[in-house]
Image (spheres, rainbow, N blue to C red):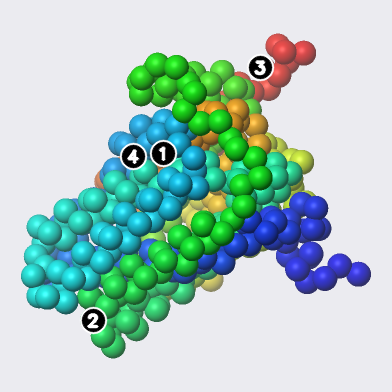
Amino acid sequence: MPSLRELLFGPPEFSALSSRNYRTYLYGNIFSVLGVWIQRLALGWQAWELSQSAFAVGVVAAAQFLPLLVLTPFFGVMADRIRPRAGAIWMHVVMASISATLALLTLAGRMNIEWLFVLALLHGVANSAYSPIRLSLVPDLVSPVRFPSAVAISSVVFNLSRFVGPGIGGVIVAAWGLGYAYLINACTYLPVVLALTLIRIDRHQEHGHASGGYLAQLGEGLRYARNHASIRQVILLVGVSSFFGRSVLELLPAYAALVFRGGSGVLAALLSASGVGAVVAGLLFSTGILRLRLRASVVVGSFGVCAAMFLFGLSDRLAVGIVTVALLGFFTTFVAVGSQSEVQIHVDNRLRGRVLSLWTILAVGGPALGSVAAGALAVELGAKPTSLLFSALCLAFVLALGIRRRDADSGAG
């Protein structure tokens, strides 16, 4: 009879937890992921305290994410030129230094909104550099057959931390103040740095052998993703599901007030439901039962995103809204985990950083751009019609991508 660990994370031969390197990295990284959410809460609250302006809060939030959209492809080239473990260690040191600076300025009473913006922007730049390096590190942690498990378990940890981290951050800020929240976050980078020094690299990946300058290598990555049918399809599908599906999740505060006529309690219920759906999706992939059906899972999940948005657009009862938001959280994460796993398995290792940087832009940048579009439409059309319209547009794009792939497969045969 299989153990609970095997039921949740699959048989040992397919489970990332069977890899010493992955376990070492995971145990150290858990603290860092929690710290990220603690710092996000502290940055938002301090921006409000210093400015009393919702616009300033939005600018500080944008400073953390805009570099990811603009700079990630260039850092993807860098990730292919260096050893991922060394790059990950240095980027954690940089991010820890930025958090320590936030702590020192706050504790000394020298923080102002300008410094807060600059440091939030620097942290955003460092995070955009770390993102492709982190994804390029996966082959050093697990064998290819365990890639889907590694991606899924990381997703589960991230989504669980999304709930636990802000709660811990709120307690720290209330008990000791914002400066200690930053200081504790700086300390959370130490375990992952130690873990990275302890992992054993059995084989040396080739990095930095591509010819040409940054733009030439960036172009090579774009052409590779464009010409690889499976990778192209799943990257485009994660972009579609993120732009349309996750943008609706970003607007849950508006839906809580306008559609369900509730306050913070209703919003908390909706956010929790989306998180539960995301965790369940990650756990499903971690069992290993979908490891041979990754591309099909991404396609099915994309249709699921469309259906969940449609049902959410029809709902006006909170209980129905909670169920449909849970489905939306499930399917958007289902697409994200499946697509990243598919890319990790099939991408040429020397192009891993560049191709996965494209995945990052669409997976992370999609909600940022989609929420702006959805917010503007919600003002003109209303919240529920916007969800229905996004569902229809999402379905049209998913159908087009599915037909295009089917035609390509037929031509190849």
In the rendered image, the vertical position of residue 102 relative to residue 329, given as above or below: below
Q: Quadrant of the C terminus?
A: top right
Closer to the chain start, of discs 3 and 2, is 2
The three-letter amino acid code for the residue at tag 4 is Leu
Closer to the eye: label 2 or 1? 2
Q: Which residue is mark 1?
A: 361
Q: Which residue is mark 3?
A: 408
SS assignment at label 1:
helix
Q: Which residue is mark 2?
A: 177
Residue furthest toward the right? 1
Which one is in front, 275 or 29? 29
Q: Residue at x 52, y 41 (%)?
A: 136
* Percent of width and height locating residue 291: 74, 45
The three-letter amino acid code for the residue at tag 3 is Ala
Closer to the chain start, of discs 1 and 4, is 4
SS assignment at label 2:
loop
Circles 1 and 4: CB atoms closer than 8 Å: yes
Q: Marks 1/3: CA distance?
A: 25 Å
Q: Marks 3/4: CA distance?
A: 30 Å
Closer to the eye: label 3 or 2? 2
* Percent of width and height locating residue 80: 47, 32
Q: Marks 2/1: CA distance?
A: 34 Å
